[in-house]
Amino acid sequence: MRRNIIQAVCVMGALLLLFAVCISACTGKRYRVDYRDEAEYVIGVSQANMREAWRLALIQEIEEEAAKYQNIRIITTDATADVEKQKQDVEKLLQFGIDLLIISPCDTSKLTEKVEEVYQGGTPVIVMDRGVEGFEYSLFIGPDNDMIGRQAGETVMELLNGKAGTVLKLCGNIHSIQSQERIQGFDSIVEKEPRITLRAQYMDTELKDTAYDVVTAMDGTLEEIDVIFASSDYVAQGAYEALEDMGMEKSIKIVGSEGFTGEGESVDMVLQGKIAATISCPTGGKEAIQYAMNILKQENGVPKQVILRSHIITKENASEYLAGQETEIVDNGQTITVGYSQVGQESQWRAANTYSIQEAAKEFNIQLLFDDANQSQERQIAAIRRFIQEQVDVIVVSPVIETGWDEVLKEARAAGIPVVMSDRKVTTKEKDLTTIYIGADFLEEGRRAMRWICDNIVPEGKTLNILELKGNKGASPTEERGKGFAEVLEECPGYQIVYSEYGNFTYEEGREIIDVYIQEHAWDIDIIYSHNDDMALGAIEALEAHGISPGTDVKIVSVDATKDAFRAMVEGKLNCAVECNPLLGAPLMKAIRDMVAGKEMPVRIITEEKVYDQSVAEELMNQRMY
Ligand code: AHR
């Protein structure tokens, strides 16, 4: 009797739900099926497919993290690797009235438009893993697959120990962007060694049985193979079982990737000596829920991209890696001492950056030892050595230039003090000398500047001459803004850079460069591209002094998007400002507290940035926070 009642209730419930969804489908309205119960937020999760172990692990991590919150409910859909179905899944989730969408796209380009539509429609979107084109989403969280490939390549090189050898790339899901990036990263390392012969077996899926069959079918040609690079966990398992059945498991080493920690999965296989190593590929499910809550509560400091860290797991560190996975992160709230080496005071951007860091330190209970290097690398190195002597908990550096840091960073590592890169990056000969990078995507900023020019300043029958005002030589923003701009310039006929000079990000030098140019040349410049606002504003002063009308006689595009840049756009003297967000204090201090509490740090956290022009300048100027 009781069972019948329960069955009847279930049937009624299902009919109600079906009825509700039908209403929504007919009226096209978003219908909040009243299954929220106590849930304050409903998060829709659109997964590309549920057949790949990594994707199942992502869903499991999302659900485990969500279970820690009383006020959220998760609805998950499985697109079964079908693009059209994933688009329909997203529509259904919207009709359920979700508050935020988490999506791991089947296909980067084919899902871009749908993600843009949802984001622009006002529903926050967290994109995971494969990403989409452009930046029309709230946040991207994913691994650096190129790095995973490079780490696998480095591991293979170590296994060959400088000897000649033959390596088989056994890669599944071959048409996916993550496999392509892993292969690209792998090749970039292994191809440097001419004595290594590369062979490849690419598969459409990454099922264990497919890998097993492919390796088994290679019997008779496997003798020459020394190492197999398997692009995922299941591929590694299939390859191992095939070799074992052919009695070859001892003669061919395997390097896997994904680093699942379940029984019989790759970390277990490493511990059992079945495979030589695996490269972890974190899913980001936990971070997705944590950031989703920040977004839903409209908290500050949510970045644009979080790129997760991967590890080379071998028999030597596998147990430690597993233990680390279980570590409970506890922030005891104690004061953390941070030594901060700042570049200097060269620009308004820098002033806003310094203020943001100093204010956030107070908010996050960080004792800040702050040194302003006034553009001197020597002074920054001295400051870092002082911080080491004072045994600070964490060192943060915004480096004036990219190179020349190896020695002092090794000293910090020897002292057991983690170093965080803020705003700008360093390039070191040795790996792992710094932890996380928090800042902008300077390359993309350069691209955006030229894309705006290409879209808005049309050559009419003549090639337009560009004068470039560059930051200080060797600084990552200078090099990357120049490179990104040049990349898009190549795609846009009708423009040429005719003059390019270092202005060191300062107002005075921006003005001086224009003065000198005018003295030495008949004025023939159509566009000025300035790596920051201060140089652009100095250039504007010089142009006006010479009777040239900035913004009309010559178009000006700048990077930073400070309030003065907005003012210049309102006055018609600047045409476009590409944003570079200096307000790094909150995400930086939050990351430091998480790191000291034992949380694994992403490789890099990239800030949210937009492009502004005169069409929006007046409306937004007073909202600018710097
Ligand atoms: O590193 C960021 C750059 O440094 C900013 O674009 C510039 O204004 C600052 O001087």
Image (spheres, rainbow, N blue to C red):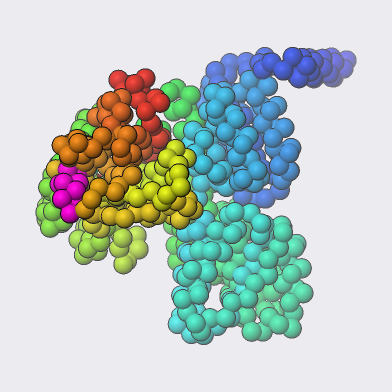
Going by the image, does 377 lie left or right of 459?
left
- Left or right position of 505 against 463: left
Decide: is 200 above or below 623: below
Find ligand 1 in the image and state its quadrant.
top left
Q: Is residue 596 in sight in this rendering? A: no
Q: Which residue is drawn at 16% across and 56% down?
A: 377
Locate residue 120 relative to residue 396 in the image: left or right: right
Q: Where is residue 535 in the image (x, y as percent from the top left)?
A: 22, 42
Residue at the image position 45 percent from the left and 66 percent from the top: 316
Q: Main secondary structure of the magenta part?
A: helix
537 w.r.t. 504: above or below: above
Q: What is the magenta range?
A: 509-520
Quadrant in which the N terminus appears: top right
The quadrant in which the C terminus is found is: top left
Total number of numbered discs in the rendering:
0
Corner quadrant of residue 25: top right
Q: Which of 320 and 33 is in front in this view?
A: 33
Looking at the image, which is closer to me, 158 or 529?
529
Q: Nearer the viewer, residue 150 or 616?
A: 616
- Residue 464 in sight in this render: yes
Was residue 315 drawn as part of the magenta stretch in this picture? no
Q: Residue 567: percent from the left, percent from the top? A: 27, 26
Please identify the quarter of the rendering in which residue 50 is found.
Answer: top right
Residue 461 at x, y = what percent? 46, 47
